[in-house]
Amino acid sequence: MTPLLFVLALTAATPAPPAALDTALARAAGEAGQWQAAARLWRGRTRSAPNDGDAWAGLGLALARLGDDEAALAALDRAAVLGIERPGLATARGQALLRRGAAAEAVTAFDRALAADPHDLAGLVGLGVAWALLGQRDAALAAFDRALALDPLDMAARHNRARLLAAP
């Protein structure tokens, strides 16, 4: 029995992994498309370091990929309050807003993303969808055309542009 107690004592005394390891594991999970694992790891990081803007940004991106738009928007907002601004975050925000039906707010988010990175393909497609939802056909076509100029084979841009042209 003594060896078992000794092992338990060692386990209880083992410190939590350093923040850098948590962050590296969360990033690796996201890069591997393991969004639930990434969200869990980022959530743990935000609990242990509530002022870590990168952790809130990572959590927001992971939650957006999982379709938890309300929580994603809250996490992305917290990252912005903490001074974290990246084009990918604005694009994720725009996509979450689109899924919520907030097309006008999505246009603002996509415009912010494209101001930082005019070659953000997902941002251009999202902008086109948002404009289409708002009934702004010409603006939507312009966004899809910009996306296709960057990648003529982009299926989302091609599909959305074709549907818009086929609509009465």
Image (spheres, rainbow, N blue to C red):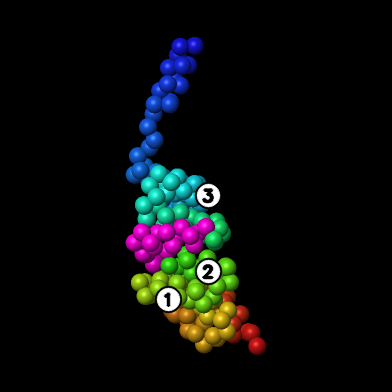
Q: Which amino acid does label 2 sit on?
A: Leu
Q: How far apart are marks 2 and 3 (CA)?
A: 21 Å
Any part of residue 78 in sight: yes
Label 2 sits on residue: 97
Q: Residue 123 location, x and y as percent?
A: 45, 71
Nearer the N terminus, badge 3 or badge 1? 3
Residue pictured at 52% horizontal, 57% vertical: 71
Is 93 magenta? The answer is no
Q: What residue type is labelled 3?
A: Gln
Can you tell which of label 2 and label 3 is closer to the viewer?
2
- In the picture shown, does residue 59 fall above or below 145? above
Kind of element beneath mark 1: helix
Q: Residue 41 location, x and y as percent?
A: 45, 46
Q: Residue 114 location, x and y as percent?
A: 40, 74
Kind of element beneath mark 2: helix
Label 3 sits on residue: 36
Q: Are marks 2 and 1 in contact (CB under 8 Å)?
A: no
Nearer the N terminus, badge 2 or badge 1? 2
Quadrant placement of the C terminus: bottom right
Q: Give the range drawn in magenta.
A: 71-89
Residue closer to the observer: 79 or 64: 79
Q: Which amino acid does label 1 sit on?
A: Asp
Label 1 sits on residue: 111
Q: Do the residues labelled 3 and 1 touch (CB within 8 Å)?
A: no
* Label 1 crowd (10 A; few <14 / some 14-19 / many >=20): many
* Label 3 crowd (10 A; few <14 / some 14-19 / many >=20): some
Residue pictured at 44% horizontal, 62% vertical: 77
Q: How far apart are marks 3 and 1 (CA)?
A: 29 Å
Main SS of residues in magenta: helix
Kind of element beneath mark 3: helix
Residue closer to the observer: 26 or 159: 26
